[in-house]
Amino acid sequence: MSAHADLASPAAHRRIAGDSGANGRETLVQKDSTGASAARAARRRGKRWRRRLVFLVLLIGASAGAVWYFQPLTASPERNAAPPTETVARRDFASSVLATGAVQPQIGAEVRVGARISGKVERLLANIGDRVVKGQVVARLEQADLEAMVAQRQAELDLAEARLAAVESLLPKEIEKARLDLEESQATYSLAEKDLGRVRSLHGQRVLTDDDLDRAEERHAVGRARVAAARKALELAETRYSEDIRQAKAEIGRAASAIANTKVQLSYATITAPIDGVIASVSTEQGETVAAGMQAPTFVTIIDLDRLQVDAFVDEVDIGKIAVGQRAAFTVDAFPATEFTGKVSAIYPKAVIQDNVVNYDVVVDIETPYHGLLRPEMTASVTILLDERSGVLAIPAKAVQRQRGKTMVYVLADGRAEPREIKVGWRDGPWIEVASGLAEGETILLEAPPTNVQ
């Protein structure tokens, strides 16, 4: 039997089919295993590519940073430029001290006006911003009780004056009567004395008896006693007159003092302006009742805007340079383009400590006309001018450095920068005086050389 016949038989077909099914299953299994292996390989390739991509990005960033960092060192001409220098030269110095202060009223230019007595405010005649002159009435308290007291004291004074008038009118008459009684007693005594002499003469001649002599002596003694009594009465009248006059005058003085005091109390009910100025504040209202105790209640505050000064607070480092009479200039924020001039008039000995900084109050009297411009509490930037000096050896202040407690500069000599210790003096803006250590014409560096290690 031929091969074709074998292939055409049903048994052959079934064998072929069976062989084909087995081979198909093997092929499917092979295909499945091959697909899983390909997927794993693809994932591994993806991870490798991602790692390579991240590494590439990091490499590019590092390269860019290195280029950016090292480019100024290689490409910037400023890195290779020579450091700035300055030649030591002589300058005219007008040293100054800078300070911050405030515009303030002078002593006596700000007055708080109040009442010295208690009472109800009957009239308030001032408002904030009003200009007042010295003696102008700004407020009144009720005065009815004070006026009644004045009338009572006046009546007491009138009574004391009436008593004095009565003493001056009546007692002189009593003194005159006592004087006449004394004269009468003296005349009677003189007559009794003469009678006694005659009786004694006749009694010696035995013309008169002893009784006559006794009566004559009695009349003489009585007359003498009456003279003494009349003299004492006259002295008493004169003494009482002087004493009553003294007491009456003292009573008048007491009454006059009482009425004067009451009138003063009455005057306190009228509050007047003690100075010329402007009403800066009003602390009470019309109709209120004020009580004067240990401190007088304030009605209004008056400021004389024509008497202002500047209180500049100078640091303790600079206060030793300040002296009375030095010139000063200042500006205020409200008028920055206007410079006001003045003169130092006082330096307060007591320090003002603010935020642990020690300052001293330096008073500057304002000489520039400032009416209508300056007001109290304005902030002032003050420049106090010190003594002017010519031909001062000076260098820029920024060239000076502090190293290990020494004042140093870098001097350029033969192309090399050498540190040198110097002593400095005054400072005038960006310039500072060289007291020793440098000579005119030398060249110094304005900055420390880059190779210097500090």
Image: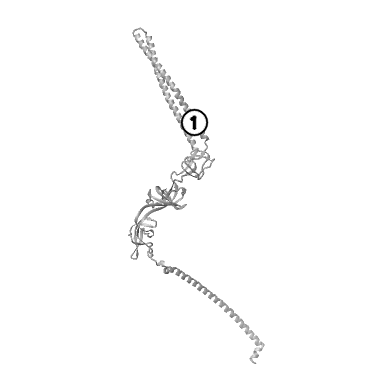
Single out the residue that lies furthest toward the top.
207
Q: Which residue occupies the foreground of this view, 350 or 300?
A: 300
Q: Is residue 255 above or below residue 431?
A: above
Q: Quadrant of the N terminus?
A: bottom right
Q: Is residue 226 above or below residue 447?
A: above
- Residue 408 in view in this figure: yes
Q: Which residue occupies the foreground of this view, 233 or 106?
A: 106
The image shows residue 445 at horizontal and vertical percentages of 37, 62
The image shows residue 346 at horizontal and vertical percentages of 40, 47
The number of numbered discs placed on residues in the rendered structure image is 1
Q: Which residue occupies the foreground of this view, 266 or 274?
A: 274
Q: How is this picture coloured?
A: one colour
Instruction: Look at the numbered disc 1 and give the secondary structure of its residue.
Output: helix
Q: Which residue occupies the foreground of this view, 394 or 299?
A: 394
The image shows residue 207 at horizontal and vertical percentages of 36, 7
- Residue type (three-letter) at the residue carrying disc 1: Gln
Q: Residue at x 48, y 34 (%)?
A: 263
Horizontal side of residue 286 vs 211, given as left or right: right
Single out the residue that lies furthest toward the bottom.
1
Horizontal side of residue 214 vs 267, given as left or right: left
Q: Is residue 445 above or below residue 301?
A: below
- Residue 358 in view in this figure: no
What crowding class fits label 1: few (fewer than 14 Cα within 10 Å), some (14-19), or many (20 or more)?
A: some
Label 1 sits on residue: 154
Single out the residue that lies furthest toward the right.
10
The image shows residue 407 at horizontal and vertical percentages of 36, 58
Q: Quadrant of the C terminus?
A: bottom left
